[in-house]
Image (tube, rainbow, N blue to C red):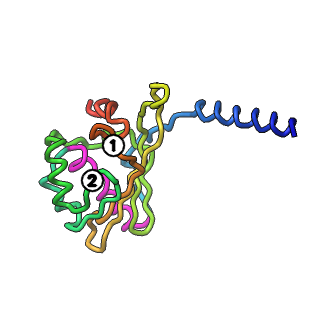
Amino acid sequence: MRRTSTFLGVLLAGLFCTAHAQVPPEPAKDQLKLLESDDPKLARNKRHVFDFWRIVYEGGHVDQAPKYMAPEYIQHNPNLPSGRDTFVEFFRKVRPPKPISDRIKAPVIAIVAEGDLVSVFTARKMRDPATGKVYTTTWFDMFRIDENGLIAEHWDPSPMWVNGLPPGAEFFKEWDN
């Protein structure tokens, strides 16, 4: 029994150490290449989400939201209500319009489409609440595209925000260069 306990202790210690000895995710070198697909519908859906992200989400041009989002947009992030109008109202307050970039400013790792879903994976810096140390992890945003080609639904892994800020918000300014 003692040998099993010792083995288990060493195994758990090793797992704990490897969890903190991660290899940070690497952003894609060419975002536009990520939009390619042999299926024209998947390529179109990827481009739609890519443009929404650049123009509306990062660029703050919420006046263009109707071009990208369904009116009955469903939001699964626990911090934000559903509905395109409430999305526009929220982002109008927190994200003033700025010049639109030809690429997503967040460090994109991958853009994957299957059926009516498009997922964007980004590298995101976060701070370990226990130690204060900064680490980089992979974040995802998944969108469902409806029969009209509009974003109808959104998922991400966000926990409840602290002080009204999403996880890693202190590092978002790094993307604004």
Q: Name the residue type under label 1.
A: Trp
Q: Earlier in the sequence, mark 1 or mark 2?
A: 2
Task: Name the residue tied to disc 2.
Answer: 80
Task: Name the residue tied to disc 1.
Answer: 161
Q: Position of residue 66 (x, y in %)?
A: 17, 62
Image point 21% across, 49% down: which residue?
A: 55
Placement of 169 over or under 154, stated as above or below = above
Q: Name the residue type under label 2.
A: Leu
Using residue 162 as the reference point, say whether residue 110 is left or right of it: right
Between 64 and 8, the one nearer to me in the picture: 8
Image point 21% across, 50% down: which residue?
A: 56
Q: Secondary structure at mark 2?
A: loop
Between 41 and 90, the one nearer to me in the picture: 90
Q: Can residue 170 be spotted in the picture? A: yes
Residue stretch rendered in magenta on the structure? 38-59
Count of numbered circles on the image: 2
